[in-house]
Image (cartoon, coloured by chain):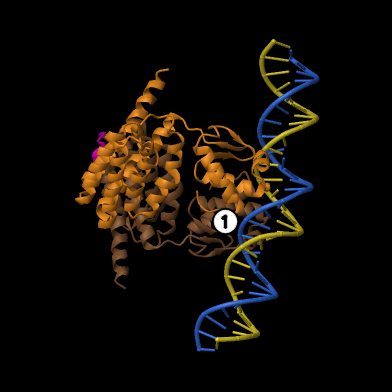
Chain colours: A brown, B orange, C blue, D yellow
Amino acid sequence: MSEAQTLAEKVFSELATAIVRGELAPGERLSEQALVTRYGGSRAPIREAIQKLEARNLVVRVPHAGARVVSLSLEELRDIYEVRLELESMACRLAAERMSDDEISALEKLLEEHARSIEADQGLSYYQKSGNLDFHYRIIEGSKNSRLHQMLCGDLYHIIRMYRYRTSTSSERPLQALKEHQRIVEAIKSRDPQLAELLMRRHIQVSLTNLETRLAHEARH
Amino acid sequence: MSEAQTLAEKVFSELATAIVRGELAPGERLSEQALVTRYGGSRAPIREAIQKLEARNLVVRVPHAGARVVSLSLEELRDIYEVRLELESMACRLAAERMSDDEISALEKLLEEHARSIEADQGLSYYQKSGNLDFHYRIIEGSKNSRLHQMLCGDLYHIIRMYRYRTSTSSERPLQALKEHQRIVEAIKSRDPQLAELLMRRHIQVSLTNLETRLAHEARH
DNA sequence: TCATTGAGGATTGTCGACAATCTATGTCTG
DNA sequence: CAGACATAGATTGTCGACAATCCTCAATGA
């Protein structure tokens, strides 16, 4: 992912991607000894890596009881989506106010690429993965709010990606999503913060509604 | 603050309050050796404590260069206030939907106490400190969103309290603040999420506006 | 049969020392 | 005299071992 200046960072990076990809199941125990034999080094950097994972809410650590890969209930997942919905709508509003004209036109070009990818039917899977993320990432950057960027990209997104395989969300309707993206960019281009926020809110709301439907469904059992 | 099951947690707790109280100045270096001689123990728990501080954004750590108490620019402080404004308004909206009737009446009683405190002119300083925090804390709890609670109380509030001495904000107008609090509770009691959110947004906006005024002022120099 | 309790083993927390890296001071050169 | 470079000191990253704590599971008693 990024350059690792120290062994602890390297282990952290590998463990983080392993968790996000689901190679380490939620609730699975992270034994320091086992990690030492697997990743090399001594326990000190492994402990540091685990603590960094805890800082990003990817693992839960209990004193004298070790660390486990975070295992979220549907309620907690709903909480996260709720916060994400609010923060990313906010980011979109701010982006409409603060993005430079150059950034906006670059964003338009990105969507044109996406349109071609979908039309060619090749990049359909691409659009489900990085393409969608690229778009949202640029909006967040456009908010010019470093803390907002940190919270959304640093903390929430890892967990959301981790649980994505569960939730059949917007990524399964690329054409619809693209149209919504285009309207959002239009609102940003016309410097209409309220509309931009509203459109983004609706765009993300689909995922949250799906999740809450499932939540209600499981509650009946 | 809370019970420390391990030495690292104890050191972390003490360092955190020291930083929030300003006993450790922003930008000040945290030498591991110095902390060892001051708090006892060995470097291992001190390092762990420092890393926990980094996780809460109270210190900044650079590989091979040590840790420093976080020193925020006014822009970064604005970013934090902006996010807090959004999240706490959201919390207020959710609280209007999800707080139990008992919690609401308890909140009303809290405000009655505050009113008496101010009238007696004794608790004026109290209201500036914990009283104000108590109110906001209960609203956040009332949102029933654990992640929202974690973000606001765990991360943002420590930093905001840390920089409070700089910003002459709403805490200097206790009577006005109390009235706003009462109106917010009214909106919650009448289960009007939109109004509750709006009132909370205005209530906090004062601080943000003050900050941005100062920001603009310093920009001219 | 079930709850309690007490080793035993395994795991985490802590320690002191060594290696790798950065910072600062002083020297040398243009 | 200014700037680059090298050396020395200090600081952080890593290591292996020891101490403290928890979990397991079998034995015991009601």
Q: Nearer the viewer, residue B149 or B137?
A: B137
Is there any visible trace of residue A139 in the rendered image?
no
Mark 1 residue crowding within 10 angstroms, few (<14) / some (14–19) / many (20+): few
Q: Position of residue A105 (x, y in %)?
A: 33, 35
Q: Residue at x 28, y 63 (%)?
A: A213
Q: Position of residue B19 (x, y in %)?
A: 52, 38
Q: Position of residue A87 (x, y in %)?
A: 35, 45
Callout 1: chain: B
**SS class, disc 1:** loop
Tell me if residue B215 comes above or below residue B67 in the rendering: above
Looking at the rendered structure, the kind of residue marked 1 is Gln
Asked if the magenta segment contains residue A192, the reply would be yes
Is there any visible trace of residue A57 in the rendered image?
yes
Q: Is residue B205 left or right of residue D27?
A: left
Q: Residue at x 31, y 34 (%)?
A: B174
Q: In the rendered image, which quarter contains the C terminus of chain A? A: bottom left
Residue marked by disc 1: B5
Q: Nearer the viewer, residue B31 or A89?
A: B31
Write down the quadrant of residue B119 in the picture.
top left
What segment carries the magenta color? A190-194
Write down the quadrant of residue D13 in the picture.
top right
